[in-house]
C-alpha cells in the first residue's frame, strides 16, 4: 500500500495522521490474529514495528518535537491533552512489554501465556485506536489552530531533522512494507 508519510507533503499534523494510517494496518492485522493460535513470528514482527515505527519514530516526533512546541503556545501538559497523550504512550509501552514477554510460551502452547498475550494485545489495540482518534480529531485540530505558518514550518523542519537523526529515515519504508506484510499475513 505504501505510505504518504513525508515531511515534504502537507502539514506536520498530516504527516502524523498518515503515520497513524500505517499503524492502524498493524492494529487491524493484530486483531485478526487474536483468535488464532499464537504465531510467534507474526507477533515478533508486530512488536518490532510497534517499537521502532509507532514508538521510535511516530511517538518520538510527538514527544520530542510536537508536544514541546504545543506547550510553548499555551496548550497545557499537566491536566491537559499533552499529559493524557504521554500517559497513553506509556500505557502502550507496558502492553508491548507484556505481549513480548509471553510470545514464546504462548506459541509453545502455554494457555496462560496465550491468554495473557491476547489480553495485552486486545488492550493495546483498544488503547491505540482511541488514542489515534483523540489525536486526529482533537489534539491535531488544536495544533493546527494554535500553530501559525511560522510554527508549522518549524515543526516540518523539526520532523525532517528527527527523521534524519534517527533510524526513522533509513527504515521508514521498511516499516511501511512490514505493516503491509503483516496485513497480508492476517488476511
Image: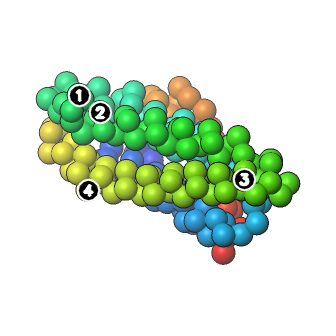
Q: Would residue 39 be seen by someone viewing this image from the given angle?
A: yes
Q: Are marks 2 and 1 in contact (CB under 8 Å)?
A: yes
Q: Is residue 106 above or below residue 84?
A: below
Q: Position of residue 90 (x, y in %)?
A: 46, 35
For discs 4 and 2, the disc positioned in front in the rendered view: 2
- Secondary structure, mark 1, is loop
For discs 4 and 3, the disc positioned in front in the rendered view: 3
For discs 3 and 2, the disc positioned in front in the rendered view: 3
Q: Which residue is mark 4?
A: 137
Query: Which residue is at a point 39% across and 47% down the rendered structure image?
Result: 16
Q: Which residue is mark 2?
A: 83
Q: Are marks 4 and 2 in contact (CB under 8 Å)?
A: no
Is 77 in front, or is 184?
A: 77
Q: From the viewer's perspective, is 159 left or right of 49?
A: left
Q: From the viewer's perspective, is 155 left or right of 94?
A: left
Q: Position of residue 83 (x, y in %)?
A: 29, 33
**How far is mark 1 from mark 4, CA to CA?**
20 Å
Q: Earlier in the sequence, mark 2 or mark 1?
A: 1
For discs 1 and 4, the disc positioned in front in the rendered view: 1
Q: Which residue is mark 3?
A: 112
Q: Which residue is mark 1?
A: 78
Query: Which residue is at a point 66% across and 70% down the rendered structure image?
Result: 35
Amino acid at each position: 500500500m505504501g505510505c504518504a508519510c513525508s515531511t515534504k507533503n502537507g502539514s506536520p499534523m498530516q504527516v502524523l495522521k498518515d503515520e497513524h494510517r500505517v499503524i492502524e494496518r498493524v492494529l487491524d492485522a493484530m486483531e485478526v490474529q487474536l483468535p488464532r493460535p499464537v504465531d510467534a513470528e507474526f507477533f515478533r514482527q508486530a512488536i518490532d514495528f510497534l517499537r521502532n515505527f509507532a514508538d521510535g519514530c511516530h511517538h518520538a516526533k510527538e514527544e520530542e518535537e510536537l508536544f514541546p512546541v504545543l506547550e510553548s503556545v499555551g496548550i497545557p501538559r499537566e491536566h491537559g491533552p499533552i499529559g493524557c497523550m504521554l500517559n497513553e504512550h506509556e500505557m502502550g509501552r507496558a502492553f508491548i512489554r507484556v505481549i513480548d514477554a509471553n510470545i514464546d510460551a504462548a506459541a509453545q502452547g502455554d494457555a496462560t501465556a496465550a491468554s495473557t498475550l491476547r489480553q495485552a494485545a486486545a488492550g493495546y489495540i483498544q488503547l491505540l485506536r482511541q488514542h489515534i482518534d483523540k489525536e486526529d480529531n482533537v489534539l491535531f485540530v488544536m495544533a493546527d489552530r494554535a500553530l501559525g505558518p511560522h510554527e508549522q514550518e518549524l515543526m516540518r523542519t523539526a520532523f525532517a531533522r528527527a527523521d534524519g537523526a534517527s533510524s526513522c529515515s533509513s527504515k521508514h519504508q521498511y516499516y511501511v512494507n512490514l505493516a503491509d506484510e503483516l496485513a497480508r499475513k492476517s488476511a
